[in-house]
Amino acid sequence: MTFQFFKQPFLLLTICLCVGILIGFELVEWQELFLSGTVLILFTALFCFWKRLLNNGVVLCLTSSVFVLIGALLIQSRGGAWEKKHMDSFYQKGDLLMVKLREVGHSDREWKKMTGDIECVYGKTSKFDFKVPVVLFVKSGNYGCETGDLILISSELNKIKNNGNPGEFDAENYWSKKGFNHMVFVGEDEYKIIEHEELPWYSQQTTNLRNYLKASLEENLKGKELAIALALILGDKSLLDSEITTSFTNTGAMHVLAVSGLHIGIIMQILMVVFSQFSKVLSRKKAVIIVVIIMWIYAVVTGLSPSVLRAVFMFSVLALSQLTGKNHNSINSLFFTAFVLMLFDPYTLYDIGFQLSFLAMLGIFLLYKPIEQLIYLKNKWLMKIWQGTAIGFAAQLMTTPLSLYYFHQFPNYFVLTNIGLMASSGLILGFGIVLFTISWWTTIARFAGLILTFIIFVSLAFIEWVEDLPGAVAYGFEVSLIVVFALGMLILFLFLWAQKRSHVILAFTGGLMLLISIIVQRYQNMNVNELCVFNARQVIITVRKDNQLFCFYKAKPDEEEKVKFAVQGYLKLHPSQIHYYSLNKKNWKLTSSKTSISVRKEKGSIEMDVNGRKYSVLLSDYSDVINSNSIKIGMPWMEAVVDHSLKNGAYIQSI
């Protein structure tokens, strides 16, 4: 297979733009050099045109260089690099912040997430104008904030930092790749709306439509079924609890809860079937145009997430290109979609949902046919099931390296899950559309709601059954970006092999080496014996020995969930049988043939003895240390000199 630029131009242009974004994000101080390089290349292009030196090779080289530089400049212009770099030198604790809100979350949770831009910092004697992105968590029942509002905040501004605990979510990397380096927790009495901005007419209409659709579901569904319907149909995850999310994640079905290409494709097919019934008054061309318009309205209603934007935009390009009668290239259309999205927002490249959905579509385009051709079944319905399974295989194969990198786990029964949810996803979306259409007809709407509830109930029961199967999830994976890239290249070799039957030895050797490295790393993670003291507001101490994890904690009753959440991240890296021991009212002493653990509370400290080695976790600067020979570990708020301060990350020691 040879690459021809003029047949697939956006394949190369998108790769160049991605390279530029990656370079620009890492090399902030090179902004002037990137500008100079862009001007130089433009002058070179003009000179070559004047001297008639342009040919395919020169054009390709100049075009590639220009789009690399465009990518670098785009990310730096959107990032406010200088302001973010110097914000900490101007801001002092106690200063007031003037923030213009970009996005306002309307979930039912205690802390509402918002994003905005700091436009001004008011110090005691001075004022500084900035434009620095910030993440806000506002604690309030009825905060009344809307997108575009200007609010004054008295809360303390903090840099987004990881706690340094094993297996924790990399919040610092996640938010920085969205352009945010600062965050602030805002209490109910720590902000004031200075200027309220009315939503534009079109925003009001889409909000009203979204509220109408949401109310249609809330009137006819309850409990978990309502939570899943809102997430799957409208992209509203506010009612999803951790139990549902964990079940879908562990079975490889999390993509079902995120409105993406799967949902867009199903809805478009449903609408086309409906409109085909009116073929006498509605031509196919008009039907396609109407469906595309409806899908864009749906994209706005569901929040314009990168995965939805990618899916709707790509399907629109494919549908409209088919109408024009011109030959269209699916790969080129996919890369064209990514190219346009990143031109508008270069941070799209770093969105995890976008990465996974893009790779899933790429996997389907590249690998579906080779996989589908491996098996031929005479039975029509069995063949359709196999084709659906082949699509799942193709998507999973391409997204697996990135999934292992981000989530440290692999759902072993993802094929079974995808087969089970193939039909139910379409039925849920179909009955959701029916419910929206007839919600004014109360009796029929309730009947449709009962059917929808039953379908979701069966789907959830199936998901929970798969989750309970032995070995449903493989934990313990720790994959580097280099391995992710290498796995991606291996998949490319597999594609080339399927096309030309070449590169077999290279693909097999590379695959075997990568597989061995991943297995070795996982084996090491699963056989770690260590003590870990977590960097948290609660005392969390774990001792792992021979696949058993003993967790000792001191926390208020309403904070015990935070303890379990922190330990769950550790368990993904080091799968173990967990045992919890509260230190609130009791000391503990555990002994076995290989392990001796003693944990007791003292005045201002937690004293431990693990296999004869003594440790002291100091809770305050005035703690009494019982054993002067112990290793002293200070909680993150302490200023006293200790052997290890948890504000620098978790304390980990092999035992």
Image (cartoon, rainbow, N blue to C red):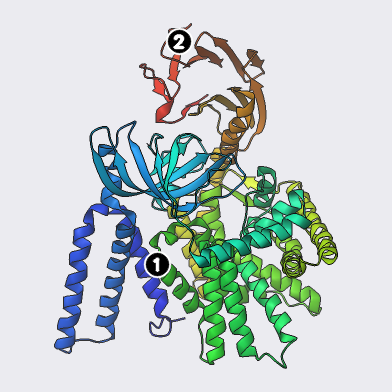
Whether pointer 1 and pointer 2 mark residues with C-beta atoms closer than 8 Å, the reply is: no
Secondary structure, mark 2, is loop
Q: Where, by quadrant of the figure, is residue 527 drawn?
A: top right
Q: Nearer the viewer, residue 554 or 201?
A: 201
Residue in the picture at 65% in, 16% down: 590
Location of residue 133 in the rendering, given as x and y in whole percent from the top left corner = 37, 49
Residue 317 shows up from this direction: yes
Res. 256 visible in picture = no
Q: Give the CA separation, mark 1 to mark 2.
A: 55 Å
Name the foreground residue: 331 vs 94. 94
Q: Which of marks 1 and 2 is nearer the N terminus?
A: 1
- Position of residue 194 in the picture relative to residue 608 (left or right): left
Question: Residue at horizontal 68%, vertical 81%?
Answer: 272
Image location of residue 285, percent across then percent down: 61, 89
Name the residue: 41% across, 14% down: 621
Total labels: the figure holds 2
Residue 344 is labelled as 1
Amino acid under label 2?
Ser
Look at mark 2 in the image and give the residue it sits on. 623
Q: What kind of residue is marked 1?
A: Phe
Image position of 183 with respect to 363: above or below: above
Mark 1 neighbour class, 10 Å CA radius: few under 14, some 14 to 19, many 20 or more: few
Mark 1: secondary structure = helix
Between 88 and 535, the residue placed more toward the observer is: 88
Residue pictured at 58% horizontal, 37% vertical: 574
Left or right of 155 on screen, residue 496:
right
Q: In the image, is residue 518 above or below residue 397?
A: above
Kindly report which numbered mark, 1 or 2, lies closer to the viewer in this rendering. 1
Q: In this view, does 210 lie to the left or right of 472?
A: left
Q: Which mark is residue 352?
A: none
Q: Residue 59: x and y, percent? A: 27, 82
> x, y (%) of residue 519?
56, 48
